[in-house]
Every structure is written in structure tokens, then in C-alpha cells.
């Protein structure tokens, strides 16, 4: 038996090594493999044990398409030679490295080697446990992408004695998960077009004469063209922004006050100068407040602020009949009333020219 085992395993190794490649289509990286198996365990002659049936299960993991690891456990049923009622049972357990060699159609041969142990428990006598090495080869036949028939031959070498046992099994492997190969898409060959005949260079096309744009106008003379002016008929002499709207620099009031602070007199004097240059213009003076207080109170406060500006203009020689004071309370804020700085921006007076 020892010679048969060595010859069989060595022959399989030699045959498979001749065809080693690096890509295995039947296996897939990351797959978990479960393989129930059944077979026969052959004992060396001097062990005085009958060969016996074995069954077990393998659990493997494919690290790559070629390399994997596998743990297994097998139950062995045997008898002592020449003894009645001398049943011997045992367990063979091992951890192996597997190398899938190549694929021949649906066939995938592989090599295996690893270590483990064997425990034999006779019905009479002491239990024996030996550590072992094993190596061998096998073959898988893939019925589908996830199921394969499997045959396996191992040369088993227990440590404590120079024994040469043989484990032969067949089973069914089930693959779960892993990265399946994507089908290759054949590239469509490019059609080479024949060279085109040389064409005459196109004649230069004369550009049509550019249309003459009409001159842009500024009707109110504020420096902003009419097509961009958002506030036409700006008073003469008034300072405007980029939209053509009259800029009245800020005139602001203290909380709950309507008296004009002296620092704002130069601003209002500039407005008086603009009013006198535009005798046909009327002016609405609009007062505003922050949000503190009731609507009724703020309406009156904003009106008083507008009236104080009107009285200032009249004191500078502006005709009262062209001036109107109007209070808006807190209904038209210039900024959110979230803090003291923004509230100060809302306590203000604005001017609106009317023609």
C-alpha cells in the first residue's frame, strides 16, 4: 500500500505541474466552498488495521483564483486485523493550502498540502492521537458556476511513526459569493475608410458689413445710459449709483428720537441744492423705524422723523408745498431687526422724487 500511495500521488503531481498557468476560470476570488465527501482510508500494513470507509466535510476560502485555504474533518470506521469485536473509529482533521492549476473546459485540477492530526479510538485500549502532514492532488468538474464534482487523493504521514496512509474521497463542492468573471466584450473592428479625394479649398466668404448701432442716450443726464437706468428722471445734480438711482447718504436717528443730529446737516444741505436745481420736482420724505414697540407707536414716530426733515428743508428756503412727509413705521426695513447694528440702519429717512 505504501508504494502504491507514493506512486499514485507522485504521478498526479508530475502530470499537473506540466500544465500550470495563472488564471482559473472555474474558481473565483473570495468564494467560500463547502464540500461534503465520502471515501476510503487505507492504513499501512504494519499498523494492523483494516482499511475503512470515511466521510466528512471540507470548508474552504479562495484567496485568489489560484490560491485557497481549506479545513476539513473526516470520520474513519475501521477494525483491528485478526480480532473479533475490535472496532476502531477515529477522526482525521487537517488544514491545507490549495493551488488550482488550470482549467480544461469544465475540469480544474489542483494540488494540496497541509498539516493536522488523527485520533483513533479502539473499542478496547487507549485512544491514540498523532500529528500528521499530508499532500496530494485532486480534480474538480464544474456542473454549474456554483457546483462542482470533486475527487481527491492524499498521502498522509503521521509524525510518531514512519507510516504512509492514503485518503481517497469524492464529493460535491458548493461555491458561495466571490467575484464572478465579467463576460468579455469583443471589440468591433474599425472600418478603415478610403482616403477622400483632395477638395478645392473653400473660397473666402466676405463678412457682411456690421450694422451701425444707434448712439446711446442719457435723457436725465445722470451719467447712466437710458437702457441701464432703473431710475429715469433723476434730479439734476443728484449723485446716483450704477443703476441711475439717487443716492441719499444715510440720515439716521437715535432710538425713540426724531431730532436730526448735526452731523447729518451737510447731507441734507446737498439735497436742498438738488431741489433748487429742479423746480418742477416734488419730494416725498419717508420715515422709518426699527421693530421695537407697537405698530401704532412706530407709525407716529416715523412720521415725526419725516416731518423733522421737511422742517429742515423749509428752514433752508424750500417751498413747503413741494414736500410731503410720510411715516412707514417698521413695515419697510432696510436690514433684519436681529441686532443693535441692523436696528440702527432701520431708524432712517429716505427721499423719493415725484414729477
Image (tube, rainbow, N blue to C red):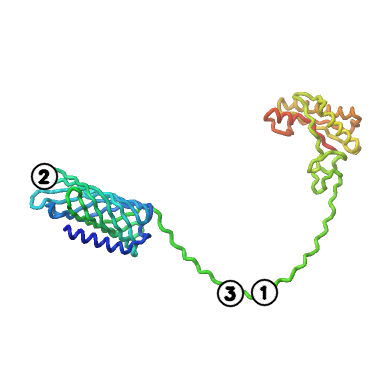
Q: Residues within 10 Å of mark 3 (few under 14, many from 20)?
A: few
113 sits left or right of 266 in the view: left
Q: Looking at the image, tell me whether mark 1 or mark 2 is earlier in sequence order.
A: 2
Q: Looking at the image, tell me whether mark 3 or mark 1 is earlier in sequence order.
A: 3
Q: Distance between the residues labelled 3 and 1?
A: 15 Å
The structure residue drawn at horizontal position 27% and vertical position 62%, both measured from the top left corner, is 14
Quarter holding residue 242: top right
Which residue is denoted by mark 2 in the rendering?
A: 124
Q: Distance between the residues labelled 3 and 2?
A: 92 Å
Q: Compared to 223, does 339 lie above or below? A: above
In the image, residue 36 lies at what x, y percent? 27, 53
Circle 1: element type: loop
Q: Looking at the image, tell me whether mark 3 or mark 2 is earlier in sequence order.
A: 2
In the image, residue 80 lies at what x, y percent? 11, 50
Circle 2: element type: loop
Which residue is denoted by mark 3 in the rendering?
A: 194
Which residue is denoted by mark 1 in the rendering?
A: 199
Q: Distance between the residues labelled 1 and 2?
A: 104 Å
Amino acid at each position: 500500500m505504501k508504494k502504491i500511495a507514493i506512486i499514485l500521488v507522485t504521478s498526479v503531481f508530475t502530470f499537473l505541474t506540466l500544465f500550470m498557468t495563472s488564471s482559473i476560470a472555474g474558481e473565483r476570488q473570495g468564494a467560500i466552498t463547502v464540500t461534503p465527501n465520502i471515501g476510503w482510508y487505507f492504513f499501512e500494513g504494519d499498523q494492523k488495521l483494516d482499511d475503512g470507509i470515511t466521510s466528512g466535510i471540507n470548508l474552504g476560502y479562495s484567496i485568489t483564483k489560484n490560491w485557497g485555504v481549506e479545513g476539513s474533518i473526516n470520520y474513519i470506521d475501521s477494525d483491528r486485523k485478526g480480532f473479533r469485536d475490535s472496532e476502531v473509529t477515529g477522526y482525521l482533521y487537517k488544514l491545507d493550502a490549495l493551488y488550482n492549476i488550470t482549467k480544461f473546459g469544465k475540469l480544474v485540477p489542483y494540488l494540496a498540502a497541509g498539516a493536522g492530526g488523527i485520533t483513533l479510538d479502539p473499542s478496547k485500549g487507549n485512544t491514540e492521537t498523532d500529528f500528521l502532514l499530508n499532500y496530494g492532488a485532486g480534480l474538480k468538474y464544474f456542473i454549474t458556476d456554483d457546483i462542482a464534482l470533486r475527487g481527491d487523493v492524499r498521502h498522509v504521514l503521521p509524525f510518531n511513526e514512519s507510516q504512509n496512509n492514503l485518503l481517497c474521497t469524492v464529493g460535491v463542492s458548493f461555491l458561495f459569493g466571490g467575484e464572478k468573471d465579467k463576460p468579455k466584450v469583443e471589440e468591433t473592428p474599425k472600418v478603415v475608410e478610403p482616403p477622400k479625394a483632395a477638395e478645392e479649398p473653400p473660397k473666402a466668404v466676405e463678412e457682411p458689413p456690421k450694422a451701425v448701432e444707434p448712439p446711446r442716450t442719457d435723457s436725465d443726464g445722470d451719467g447712466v445710459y437710458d437702457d441701464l437706468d432703473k431710475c429715469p428722471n433723476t434730479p439734476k445734480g443728484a449723485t446716483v449709483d450704477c443703476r441711475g438711482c439717487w443716492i441719499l447718504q444715510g440720515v439716521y436717528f437715535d432710538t425713540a428720537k426724531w431730532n436730526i443730529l448735526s452731523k447729518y446737516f451737510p447731507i441734507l444741505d446737498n439735497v436742498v441744492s438738488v431741489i433748487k436745481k429742479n423746480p418742477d420736482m416734488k419730494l416725498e420724505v419717508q420715515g422709518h423705524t426699527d421693530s421695537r414697540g407697537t405698530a401704532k407707536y412706530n407709525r407716529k414716530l416715523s412720521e415725526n422723523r419725516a416731518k423733522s426733515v421737511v422742517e429742515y428743508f423749509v428752514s433752508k428756503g424750500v417751498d413747503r408745498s413741494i414736500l410731503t412727509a410720510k411715516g412707514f413705521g417698521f413695515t419697510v426695513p432696510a436690514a433684519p431687526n436681529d441686532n443693535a447694528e441692523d436696528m440702527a440702519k432701520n431708524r432712517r429717512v429716505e427721499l423719493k422724487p415725484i414729477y
